[in-house]
């Protein structure tokens, strides 16, 4: 099967005198390099210019808060199970009375760590999450001077109440449509970006179960 | 000119040539990186100053600041002597090159050449041949097999190509009838460039110049893929810098020699019709010479970033079996043409 017309049949014939002189070949080779001299350079001067990212770029994770500012994560561990790189670890804890405004449900992640050196940014954690808690964002992971600093804990991962992370670029209509087909039907009951619905109005199937 | 005035003038000229040589060599490193980048669709150094123009300065600071290491098993004296000789011989060659004709100020003639030796070509060859000692001594005294191999390659390569180079020059000397660089340059006024009289000799000379300066495709002495760093594997800090710098000085001097021998030196065709003041003409001549030199330095780099390196046996075959017979043929043809031309009488 021929895919392109660029393939050439290699022949090991004896070189002619002109070919053995090499000078014409050298000259043509130099013309080729010289033609590159004036070509437009594809270089992106990085710190000043950045390459344009796709809208669905998968970068640093965020642990979302709900409408009231409570952490959505319930430390169910599905993200850790889904993670092919085994980058996620967590410790669960029980919510104490009076902490309702801090944690959305009775169980929460006391410790939640993602090793950014292990993470392959596949987005499986995001897909596995039944609570719409973890998302990959369009932020790049900073470089660090040591390995330990790249194990991100909750202090980095959980979004701040004041400036929540915008996920609208990643939550395209196609993604939302896809999520409707997910096993967890609760996913379609609320819109994460517009934050129109309160979760109390739409009790979700998972919430009904005993955790 | 009194002796004092002469000494002062020559001193200034020597300093000027030395300074210009170093400056050109410094910026050759920048040019090399830029040209390499452009030929490969890259941008090259552009961080230090506008367009990276201060990059050589940064490189120099880096070279001076690096830790200096002398291997304990090396011969310390020779280890230091190696780069010194390489640098010294590289700087010595600029003496006989006519950078321009001569300036006449208040009736005193100031030639723009440090000294017009009547055997200028021989002097040049002698000094260039000494240059191999720097590399050889450096490679041998390092007490490292890669350095030694690099040094051996350098010496055998330079000896091989010096023969062809000398034979190419003999044909040139036959047509010009002089060994003085000044006269060779002066003879090529207008379009009487030796490149048109001696095309084959010119080609051989340029190829040999590439080999003599250890530039690609003849850079076997420092062949990274086989010999780590070649003769300068064990060198660090500014001693390494001297080796690399000497290469660029050699390149500059080679370009100057090629321009002077074959491409009219400081002469430029048709310029005599527009400019009549001999002093202005002399200064313009210097400019023209440097334009030619710049072109050849560019040419050196252009070739380096186009052609792959020779294999060692190919190098030797080209030197001994092709270039030397060709240069002898060139001498014979030149002799025949001169005989039938009647220019022998």
Image (cartoon, coloured by chain):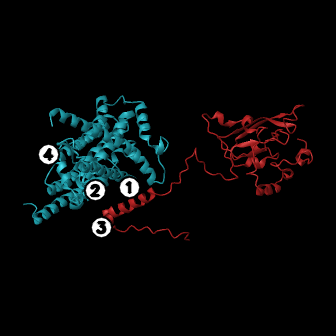
Chain colours: A red, B cyan
B161 or A158, nearer to the observer: A158
Circle 3 is placed at which residue position? Answer: A17
Q: Are marks 2 and 3 in contact (CB under 8 Å)?
A: no
Disc 4 is attached to a residue of which chain? Answer: B
Q: Are marks 3 and 1 in contact (CB under 8 Å)?
A: no
Give the quadrant of residue B244. top left
Q: Earlier in the sequence, mark 1 or mark 4?
A: 4
Disc 1 is attached to a residue of which chain? Answer: B
Q: Position of residue B138 (x, y in %)?
A: 31, 36
Q: Position of residue A149 (x, y in %)?
A: 65, 34
Which residue shows up at 15% across the image and 49% down it? B179
Circle 2 is placed at which residue position? Answer: B318
Q: Residue furthest left?
A: B345
Measure how far apart labels 2 and 4 are at the Cα level. Answer: 32 Å
Q: Which is more foreground, mark 2 or mark 4?
A: 4
Confirm whether circles 3 and 4 share one chain.
Answer: no
Left or right, B183 with respect to B81, comes to: left
Q: Position of residue A88 (x, y in %)?
A: 72, 40
B65 or A196, nearer to the observer: A196
Q: Which is more foreground, mark 1 or mark 4?
A: 4
Q: Earlier in the sequence, mark 2 or mark 4?
A: 4
Q: Is residue B202 above or below residue A70?
A: below
The disc at residue B118 is 4
Q: Which is more foreground, mark 1 or mark 2?
A: 1
Disc 2 is attached to a residue of which chain? Answer: B
Measure how far apart labels 1 and 2 are at the Cα level. Answer: 15 Å
Circle 1 is placed at which residue position? Answer: B307
């Amino acid at each position: 099967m021929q895919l392109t017309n660029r393939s050439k049949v290699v022949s090991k014939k004896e070189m002619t005198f002109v070919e053995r002189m090499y000078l014409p070949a050298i000259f043509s080779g130099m013309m080729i390099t010289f033609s590159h001299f004036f070509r437009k350079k594809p270089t992106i001067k990085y710190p000043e210019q950045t390459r344009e990212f796709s809208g669905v770029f998968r970068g640093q994770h965020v642990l979302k808060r709900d409408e009231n500012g409570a952490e959505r994560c319930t430390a169910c561990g599905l993200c850790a199970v889904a993670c092919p790189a085994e980058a996620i670890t967590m410790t669960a804890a029980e919510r104490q009375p009076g902490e309702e405004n801090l944690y959305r449900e009775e169980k929460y992640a006391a410790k939640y760590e993602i090793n950014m050196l292990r993470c392959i940014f596949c987005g499986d954690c995001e897909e596995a999450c039944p609570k719409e808690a973890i998302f990959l964002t369009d932020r790049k992971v900073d470089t660090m001077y040591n390995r330990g600093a790249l194990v991100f804990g909750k202090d980095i991962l959980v979004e701040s109440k004041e400036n929540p992370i915008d996920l609208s670029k990643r939550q395209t209509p196609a993604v939302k449509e896809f999520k409707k087909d997910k096993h967890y039907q609760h996913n379609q009951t609320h819109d994460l970006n517009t934050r129109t619905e309160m979760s109390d109005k739409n009790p979700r199937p998972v919430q009904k179960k005993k955790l | 000119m009194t002796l004092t005035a002469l000494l002062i003038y020559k001193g200034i000229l020597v300093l000027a040539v030395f300074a210009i040589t170093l400056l050109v060599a410094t910026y050759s490193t920048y040019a090399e990186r830029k040209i390499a980048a452009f030929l490969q669709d890259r941008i090259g150094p552009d961080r230090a100053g506008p367009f990276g123009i201060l990059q050589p300065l940064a490189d120099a600071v880096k070279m001076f600041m690096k830790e200096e290491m002398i291997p304990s098993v090396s011969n310390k004296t020779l280890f230091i002597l190696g780069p010194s000789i390489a640098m010294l011989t590289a700087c010595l060659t600029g003496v006989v090159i006519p950078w321009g004709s001569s300036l006449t100020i208040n009736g005193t003639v100031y030639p723009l050449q440090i000294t017009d030796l009547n055997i200028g070509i021989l002097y040049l060859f002698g000094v260039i041949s000494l240059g191999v000692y720097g590399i050889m001594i450096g490679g041998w005294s390092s007490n490292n097999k890669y350095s030694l191999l690099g040094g051996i390659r350098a010496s055998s390569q330079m000896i091989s190509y010096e023969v062809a180079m000398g034979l190419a020059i003999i044909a040139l000397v036959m047509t010009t009838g002089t060994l003085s660089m000044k006269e060779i340059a002066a003879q090529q006024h207008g379009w009487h460039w030796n490149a048109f009289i001696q095309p084959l000799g010119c080609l051989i000379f340029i190829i040999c110049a590439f080999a003599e300066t250890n530039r690609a495709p003849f850079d076997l002495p420092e062949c990274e893929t086989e010999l780590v760093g070649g003769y300068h594997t064990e060198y660090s800090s500014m001693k390494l810098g001297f080796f690399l710098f000497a290469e660029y000085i050699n390149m500059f001097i080679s370009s100057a020699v090629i321009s002077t021998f074959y491409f009219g030196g400081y002469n430029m065709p048709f310029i005599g019709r527009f400019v009549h003041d001999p002093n202005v003409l002399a200064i313009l001549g210097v400019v023209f010479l440097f334009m030619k030199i710049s072109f050849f330095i560019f040419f050196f780099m252009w070739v380096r970033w186009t052609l792959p390196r020779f294999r060692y046996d190919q190098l030797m075959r080209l030197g001994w079996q092709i270039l030397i017979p060709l240069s002898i043929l060139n001498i014979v043809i030149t002799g025949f043409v001169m005989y039938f031309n009647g220019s022998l009488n």
